[in-house]
Image: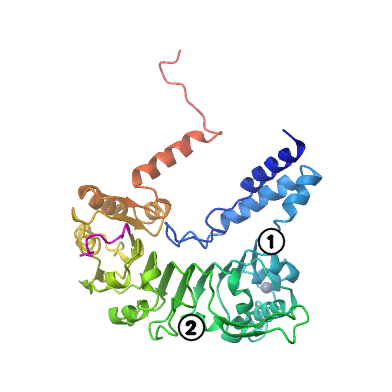
């Protein structure tokens, strides 16, 4: 093997060693739930591995340094833990989450010092640094005037989560480079983010779903989630239908979540005409997802475990809710998925976990968690992890001499 090939092989191994599944995934909703996508623990774990590998030799250090700051929180830039100049090299940028600091300058500062500070850093960086940036994933948002310069990065964006209902406005307008010495050639009209594949909106039910998200502005959008933050008034089925008329036909995943209680109503079956290609769906608890037309590609129905009244310790109520919300018939053999992990659910409520598992077992149907594991697979995983612990002591049995 030539030395050149050897370097290439090492680079592939190093890239594998520092890869971050899920958190830096640009198709996070492709098959699984969203709850894991905001968990950054694995990223920081991999960063520690990367830093260790950088100390092995100068060549590795040089190679791995190019992967600095793949994820940046604006909170860290504000607090000068990360230099502002690193922002163009980040793949994922979190605009909102807090580090839990309580400094007098920003976090406990006067008035709106914290948010004004973060928005100021963001807008200055967008105007100051040359394009293109590497950012593909944006988590969170600021006011419209702070987000509109994002249209310069529109072509690169693949995932936007925790966005407001009117996020589409960021991508309507003209980019003029006449005042920008770094980008003199850039003067063009922008309408949409052509490579955006995944979008998750957080909205208040009093707000209308507008402006509409249309295919011509977002031709690559395949995974769409809507989370209604407050529950006083759910969006009516017709509102959702109106909204889906412009984007529904290209969706492979549609998650719509709000929680009201145990009042099942019939689902308007015309929804399936608006979502002819959807393979994975989550609907409000009240809309009973039965009568999926024959030949429809639906494979997976996601369930929000928190929507079940698991705090009511009554198996009859649970089973009644399950039979409404997860109607299992020989015709509709979909896979049902929980939006949380078995570890989480078993820790929170063992009785409810057993009830929901039992219901699916009795109906000979598949239930998996956010990792894609059935309960049996999860138990096997836990047992294997337990026996692999290096510190475990093995006791001799009475029969061992
Ligand atoms: Zn602070």
Q: Position of residue 370 (x, y in %)?
A: 41, 55
Name the one closer to the observer, 271 or 39.
Answer: 271
**Horizontal arrangement in the rendering, residue 4 relative to residue 374 (left or right):** right
For the rendered model, the colour scheme is rainbow
Q: Secondary structure at mark 1?
A: loop
Residue 400 within the segment the image draws in magenta: no
List the residue tagged with mark 2.
166
Residue drawn 72% across the image and 38% down it: 6
- 358 to 302, vertically: above or below: above
Distance CA(mark 1)–CA(mark 2): 29 Å
Number of numbered discs on residues: 2
Residues rendered magenta in the picture:
290-300
Q: Position of residue 124 (x, y in %)?
A: 71, 80
Residue drawn 28% across the image and 71% down it: 273
Local crowd at mark 2 within 10 Å, few (<14), some, or many (≥20)?
Answer: some
Ligand 1's quadrant is bottom right
Name the one closer to the observer, 14 or 274.
Answer: 274
**Could one spot residue 297 in this view of the protein?**
yes
**Could one spot residue 234 in this view of the protein?**
no
List the residue tagged with mark 1.
69
Instruction: State which tag comes first along the sequence, 1 or 2.
Output: 1
Residue drawn 62% across the image and 74% down it: 153
- Look at the numbered disc 2 and say if its residue's Cβ is closer than 8 Å to ligand 1: no
- 55 to 170, vertically: above or below: above
- 245 to 349, vertically: above or below: below
Q: Position of residue 269 (x, y in %)?
A: 23, 72
């Amino acid at each position: 093997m030539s030395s050149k090939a050897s370097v290439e092989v090492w680079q592939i191994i190093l890239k594998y060693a520092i890869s971050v599944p899920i958190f830096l995934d640009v198709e996070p909703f492709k098959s699984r739930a969203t709850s894991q996508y905001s968990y950054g623990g694995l990223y920081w774990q991999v960063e520690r591995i990367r830093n260790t590998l950088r100390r092995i030799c100068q060549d590795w250090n040089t190679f791995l340094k190019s992967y600095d700051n793949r994820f940046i929180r604006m909170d860290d830039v504000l607090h000068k833990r990360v230099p502002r100049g690193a922002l163009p090299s980040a793949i994922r940028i979190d605009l909102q989450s807090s580090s839990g600091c309580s400094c007098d300058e920003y976090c406990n500062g006067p008035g709106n010092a914290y948010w004004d500070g973060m928005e100021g850093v963001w807008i200055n960086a967008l105007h100051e640094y040359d394009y293109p940036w590497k950012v593909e994933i944006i988590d969170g948002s600021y006011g419209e005037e702070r987000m509109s310069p994002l249209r310069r990065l529109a072509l690169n964006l693949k995932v936007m989560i925790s966005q407001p209902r009117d996020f589409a406005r960021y991508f309507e307008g003209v980019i003029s480079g006449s005042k920008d010495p770094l980008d003199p050639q850039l003067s063009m009209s922008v309408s949409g983010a052509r490579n955006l594949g995944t979008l998750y909106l957080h909205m208040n039910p009093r707000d209308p779903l507008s402006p509409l998200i249309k295919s011509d502005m977002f031709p690559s959008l395949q995974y769409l989630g809507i989370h209604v933050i407050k529950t006083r008034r759910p969006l009516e089925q017709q509102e959702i239908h109106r909204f889906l008329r412009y984007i529904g036909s290209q969706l492979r995943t549609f998650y719509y979540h709000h929680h009201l209680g145990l009042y099942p109503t019939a689902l308007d079956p015309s929804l399936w005409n608006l979502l002819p290609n959807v393979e994975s769906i989550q609907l409000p608890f009240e809309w009973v997802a039965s009568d999926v037309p024959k030949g429809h590609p639906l494979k997976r129905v996601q369930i929000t475990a928190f929507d079940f009244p698991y705090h009511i310790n009554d198996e009859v109520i649970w089973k009644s809710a399950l039979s409404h919300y997860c109607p299992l018939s020989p015709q509709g053999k979909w896979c049902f998925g929980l939006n949380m992990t078995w570890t989480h659910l078993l820790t929170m409520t063992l009785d409810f976990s057993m009830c929901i598992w039992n219901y699916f077992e009795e109906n000979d149907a598949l239930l998996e968690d956010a990792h894609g594991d059935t309960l049996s697979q999860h138990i096997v995983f836990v047992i294997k992890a337990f026996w692999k612990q290096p510190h475990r002591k093995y006791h001799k049995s009475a029969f061992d001499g």
